[in-house]
Amino acid sequence: QVQLVESGGGLVQAGGSLRLSCAVSRTLFFSASVKAWYRQAPGKQRELVAAITRDGTTNYADSVKGRFTISRNLAKNTIYLQMNSLRPDDTAVYYCYTKNSRDDWGQGTQVTVSS
């Protein structure tokens, strides 16, 4: 049963913007204590990009502060990642994540930033 489905990745030039979306099953969306975006670049470990807690508190990796924004739409059970001023080193597969009694991951969406 697929509970997290990402969309919105693609190819963009440096300086451009993309918005990622993650549709979450309703039960999981409202029970998860943390919802987040991670990314994994080739040859590197998966890293936290941004997270939002149930009360709306957000936190970001230093490398994306001021450029990326995580948000949620309660009516649509969806998490977003708005990415502005993209750089080539933002190129990675981006994963949606929720934390509940277990960890759940989406299938990932590729973001490629060309210089």
Image (spheres, rainbow, N blue to C red):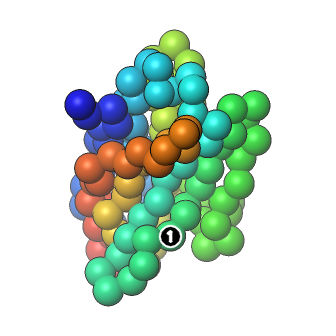
Q: Amino acid at mark 1?
A: Glu
The residue at which mark 1 appears reads as 47
- Quadrant for the N terminus, please: top left
Query: What element does badge 1 sit on?
Result: strand
Left or right: residue 15 compared with residue 59? left
> Residue placed farthest to the top in the image?
75
Residue 93 location (% of width, % of height): 32, 63
Left or right: residue 92 compared with residue 55? left
Residues packed near mark 1 inside 10 Å, few (<14), some (14 to 19) or many (20 plus)? some
Left or right: residue 68 compared with residue 62? left
Residue at 62% across / 50% down in the picture? 51
Task: Give the total number of marks visible in the rendering.
Answer: 1
Residue 42 location (% of width, % of height): 29, 81
Q: Identify which residue, 18 or 49, lies in the foreground.
A: 49
Left or right: residue 38 compared with residue 71? left
Residue at 61% across / 42% down in the picture? 34
Residue 39 lies in quadrant: bottom left
Q: Is residue 45 above or below residue 15?
A: below
Q: Is residue 90 visible?
A: no
Residue 27 location (% of width, % of height): 46, 20
Q: Is residue 71 above or below residue 25?
A: below
Residue 105 location (% of width, % of height): 38, 48
